Amino acid sequence: MTFCFQAPPDVVTSEQRHEAEQVFLQLRNTKNPFNLCRQLLETSQADYLLFEAATLLRVGVIREWRDLSKEDILQLRQYIVHYVVNRVNLPHYVRETLVQVVGIMVKRGSVEDQGEDRGRLLTEVEQLVSSGDNTMRMIGCSIISALMQEYAVTVKSTDVGLTWETHFKAKKQFEGSDLRRIFHFIVNLLGEVVKVEGKMSGELSSLLLKLLVIAETTLTWSFISLHHILLL
């Protein structure tokens, strides 16, 4: 299936390619797709199928959120984080799609739990980067970036199925609690990175850039209430 979709024009016919495309389109309409996504993520060696599984997770979470129990949501969120952390060779676009799903889930959940799971996630991220491993630090930064993206005022934020009124309520709650936590965490991590002596490796340079982007995002954040700026 994946071969037919990605193969050169001289290897497969247009009919075979069209049939493969239809399979992927049908896959995205699968109801309650979460076990299927897990199976694909665990067993597939094809990057495109991994990306389709991650995309289907995002679609399924948004579409079927109201039908998921709190236990299902927490287990799925923890599974995705565990998967990303333990598959360090994932293609960048697959990893970023998966951490976006995490951001969506945490934001949707914060409407009801007032950021309880968000706090747990940030603790997990802090523990993740405390190892000193730059790959783990990059993954942690990706998770934080995805989380901040969901609370920012952007067109993408409307894709999670929330009204603007609910979005602004969740955003204000985030600003009054964990945005400051993220800022201090990133500043401390920046301090550790810049203390590294000698020529900076490409990996460390990438980490530094990611940290600077997150720091800039917090410093240029569009607050619901301007007086929250003083809390930083």
Image (tube, grey):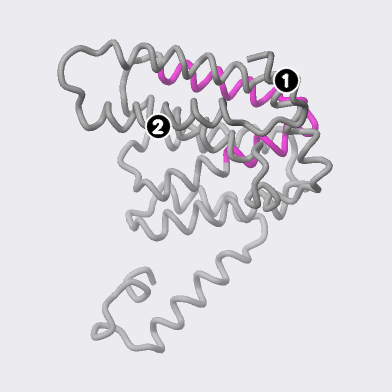
Comparing 193 with 102, the one in front is 193
Magenta span: predominant SS is: helix
Label disc, if present, on residue 207 of the rendered structure: none
Q: Quadrant of the C terminus?
A: top right
Judged from the image, the secondary structure of the residue bearing numbered disc 2 is helix
**The label number, if any, that marks residue 210 in the structure image:** 2
Residue 184 in the image: state x and y as whole percent. 53, 14
* Residue type highlighted by circle 2: Lys
- Answer left or right for 223 relative to 209: right
In this view, 195 is above or below 23: above
Q: Where residue 228 is drawn, which disc sits there?
A: 1
Q: Which residues are magenta?
A: 102-129
Q: How many marks?
A: 2
Mark sitting earlier along the chain (2/1):
2
Relative height, residue 54 to residue 106 (above, below): below
Q: Amino acid at mark 1?
A: His
Question: Residue 91: where, in percent of width, then height?
Answer: 34, 48
Q: Is residue 202 magenta?
A: no
SS state under label 1: helix
- Residue lying at 71% horizontally and 25% vertically, measured from the top left: 115
Residue 125, magenta (yes or no): yes
